[in-house]
Image (tube, rainbow, N blue to C red):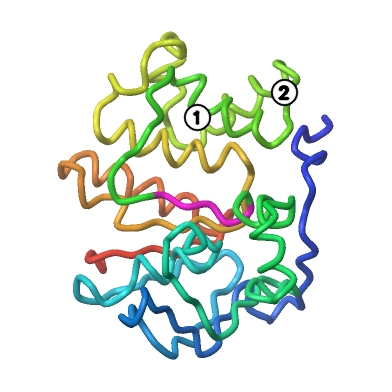
Amino acid sequence: MVNPLNTIEKLPVSQSINDPLIQTERLCLHYGTKPAFADVSLPIYTGSITALVGPSGCGKTSFLSCLNRLTDLIPNAKVTGRIRFGSLDVLSPRMDAIAKGGAMELIALRRRVGMIFQKPSPFPFSIWKNLAFPLREHGVKNRANIAQLIETALRDVGLWDEVKDRLHTSALALSGGQKQRLCIARALVLQPEVLLLDEPCSALDPISSGVVEDLIARLRGRYTLVIVTHNLA
């Protein structure tokens, strides 16, 4: 079967088998004159789980946001140093120009490096539209292809059997744990290489947290995971 996402513009990401998929070098971030973190050099390897642990306010979430340039959306944020994603120099002057112009390379970067936030944040749409929306934004128009990708993503997060008969009901009616799994599915539906997870269980009850933690463990190896967490179990 033809992959319906193959039509989306892709970035050149080549690497030897022993090289990190992502490498930061002396990475620093300031909000105005206030430093968020400084001089972070970190290799992140394909298929691994990299956990970022530290006290609140030490810059863990800010570090995640640098990896796919979500910091571009924050006023007065200034990132220095280097981030390599395979052969791509994420902070190069060329990518700076692309960011200002909204060109496809930056959109492709954010597709390939997805972000899951601390608080479950489904769109105020149906379950179906939550997953169809990013696909359509990235150029997938065929309804059969969209349906295929949505079902696959929901199965990957263990939601398909729970919601398959109510796909066109509001996502806001889901439980907290279901909402977070839907948000993970919304990232997975675009077939990323990397998932950035910012304390994905901190707003959930213990049972829902266990379900999401088990899901993250199952995703290991299929995706490269970078997670902010207080749980080292």
Provide the residue span drawn in magenta.
112-116
Q: In this view, does 181 lie above or below 199?
A: above
Q: Using the image as rendered, state which of residue 162 and residue 69 is in the foreground.
A: 69
> Is disc 1 placed on a helix, strand or loop?
helix
First of labels 1, 2 by sequence position = 2
Badge 1 is on which residue? Answer: 154
Badge 2: how crowded within 10 Å, few (<14), some, or many (20+)?
some
Check disc 1 and give the amino acid type.
Answer: Leu
Residue 114 part of the magenta-drawn span? yes
Q: Position of residue 193 (x, y in %)?
A: 62, 56
The quarter of the picture where the C terminus appears is bottom left
> Is disc 2 placed on a helix, strand or loop?
helix
Q: Is residue 80 left or right of residue 17?
A: left
The quarter of the picture where the N terminus appears is top right
Check disc 2 and give the amino acid type.
Answer: Asn
Q: Distance between the residues labelled 1 and 2?
A: 14 Å
Kindly identify the residue that appears in the image at 55 percent across and 42 percent down: 188
Q: Position of residue 3 (x, y in %)?
A: 78, 35
Q: Is residue 90 left or right of residue 175?
A: right
Kindly identify the residue that appears in the image at 41 percent across and 33 percent down: 182
Residue 117 part of the magenta-drawn span? no
Kindly identify the residue that appears in the image at 59 percent across and 34 percent down: 134
Badge 1: how crowded within 10 Å, few (<14), some, or many (20+)?
many
Kindly identify the residue that appears in the image at 84 percent across and 32 percent down: 2
Give the overall secondary structure of the magenta segment: strand
Determine which of the numbered discs, if any, sits on residue 120 in the image: none
Badge 2 is on which residue? Answer: 145
